[in-house]
Image (spheres, rainbow, N blue to C red):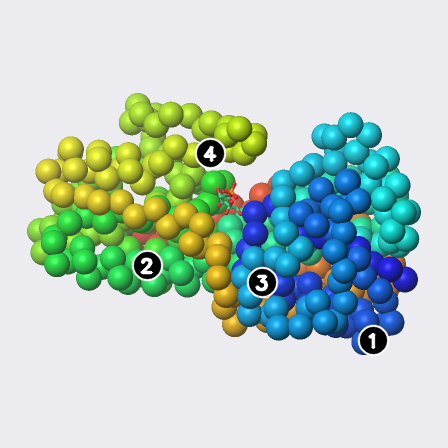
């Protein structure tokens, strides 16, 4: 048996830990061979491969990024994409594919598996934690830790200057990173994409903090939006690669707070810092367990499935369940956090 492995979409701490676990268990316990496909679905589409064996995965557990590279290439949108993928799998004598990715990457795996008979198993990843059908994705814990440390540091500089500090974190469609890091870091307001925010309310929270000589920290997810009427942001735009670019809600918010309250405000955009570097112990643990269970799914020829965390158990769920809806923040969790606002 030869198994192909690819990592697609935005990178995420823990990808290398998954690859290592798949290869270690696959070689040692099942005698499988592996082919690494470079840069997500670009690899099988163009026949771009890298050797993948035990020496190749040695020492990669604590390393961020992915030794296989990543991209957002979608073979379903390429000319004769499915045919080319199938031809390359045949050419490299690959019997099964493990796709490690988020909604888009796993969406391709779902279609290839369910509609075109390509034997695929999926592993969920995203720092945003917005994939349905799994309690957590690896990368999220690391991102939350990075954001929390940043908020801790921003508290002291905000207090020294009695300024408002706005921290923009990742999360285009879901506010998980904002909610968890905001709670862990003691933010005075947390703004998430799931709930349009009221700028007057945010300014009232900010002012109430100044009354007790306490400099406020506002955590805002990049996809958060003000209620109608307050919207002066440009709409989402596409860059020259066709990727969605958001237009800087953090900067806009700091300017508006300053204008409306007369308090000095600054913005920190954490950006890709949240995605880089070494994974946390939790993410290494989760990624490793996902890898071990993904290769078991291959052994069982359980195609069209994704490994997922349910409580403390790793289970298999239909890939389709993970790619047809997003897991957004439950309004009850957001309401619960509200006791700390203002
Ligand atoms: O992985 C998801 C994510 O981190 C989003 O929160 C963010 O908007 C996006 O990736 C940015 O990705 P890139 O800059 O690689 O296009």
Q: Residue 276, percent across and down? A: 48, 57
First of labels 2, 3 by sequence position: 3
In the rendered structure, the answer to whether residue 332 lies left or right of residue 269 reads right
For the residues labelled 2 and 4, the Cα–Cα distance comes to 23 Å
Q: CA distance from mark 3 to mark 1?
A: 22 Å
Q: Where residue 3 sits in the image (x, y, percent)? A: 83, 58
Q: Can residue 153 be seen?
A: yes
Give the residue pinned by disc 3.
14
Q: Residue at x 70, y 37 (%)?
A: 74
Mark 4 close to ligand 1, CB under 8 Å? yes
Q: Which residue corresponds to the image point at 16% horizontal and 37% vertical from the top-left?
A: 258
* Residue closer to the observer: 55 or 246: 55
**Residue 245 shows which numbered tag?**
4
Q: Secondary structure at mark 3?
A: loop
Q: Earlier in the sequence, mark 3 or mark 4?
A: 3
Quadrant into which the N terminus falls:
bottom right
SS of the residue under disc 4: strand
User: Disc 1 marks which residue?
Assistant: 29
Element assignment for label 1 = helix
Q: Which mark is residue 150?
A: 2
Q: Nearer the viewer, residue 36 or 5?
A: 36
User: What residue appears at the point 74 percent right and 66 percent down from the top-left corner?
Assistant: 22
C-alpha separation, residue under disc 2 versus residue under disc 3: 21 Å
Q: Position of residue 298 (x, y in %)?
A: 83, 61
Whether ligand 1 has any atom under 8 Å from the Cβ at mark 2 is answered as no
Q: Earlier in the sequence, mark 2 or mark 4?
A: 2
Label 2 crowd (10 A; few <14 / some 14-19 / many >=20): some
């Amino acid at each position: 048996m030869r198994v192909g492995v690819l990592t697609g979409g935005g990178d995420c701490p823990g990808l290398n830990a998954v690859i290592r676990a798949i290869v270690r268990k696959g070689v040692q316990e099942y005698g499988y061979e592996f082919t690494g496909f470079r840069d997500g679905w670009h690899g099988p589409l163009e026949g771009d491969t890298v050797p993948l064996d035990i020496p190749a995965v040695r020492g990669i557990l604590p390393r961020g990024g992915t030794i296989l590279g990543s991209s957002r290439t979608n073979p379903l949108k390429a000319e004769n994409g499915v045919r080319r993928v199938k031809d390359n799998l045949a050419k490299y004598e690959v019997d099964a594919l493990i796709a490690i990715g988020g909604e888009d990457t796993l969406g391709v795996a779902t279609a290839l598996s369910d509609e075109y008979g390509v034997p695929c198993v999926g592993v969920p990843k995203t720092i945003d934690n917005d994939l349905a059908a799994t309690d957590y994705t690896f990368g999220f814990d690391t991102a939350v830790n990075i954001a929390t440390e940043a908020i801790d540091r921003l508290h002291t500089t905000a207090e020294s200057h009695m300024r408002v500090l706005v921290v923009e974190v990742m999360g285009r469609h879901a506010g998980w990173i904002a909610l968890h890091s905001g709670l862990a870091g003691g933010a005075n307001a947390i703004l998430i994409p799931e709930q349009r925010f009221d700028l007057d309310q945010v300014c009232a929270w900010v002012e109430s903090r100044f009354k007790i000589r306490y400099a406020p920290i506002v955590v805002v997810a990049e996809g958060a939006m003000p209620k109608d009427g307050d919207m002066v942001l440009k709409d989402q735009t596409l860059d020259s690669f066709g990727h969605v670019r958001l237009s800087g809600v953090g900067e806009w918010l700091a300017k508006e707070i300053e204008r409306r309250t007369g308090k000095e405000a600054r913005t920190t955009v954490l950006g890709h810092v949240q995605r880089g570097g070494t994974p946390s112990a939790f993410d290494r643990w989760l990624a490793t367990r996902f890898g071990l269970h993904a290769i078991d799914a291959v052994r069982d020829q359980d195609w069209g499935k994704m490994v997922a965390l349910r409580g403390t158990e790793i289970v298999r769920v239909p890939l389709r369940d993970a790619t047809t809806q997003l897991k957004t923040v439950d309004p009850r969790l957001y309401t619960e956090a509200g006791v700390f606002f203002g």
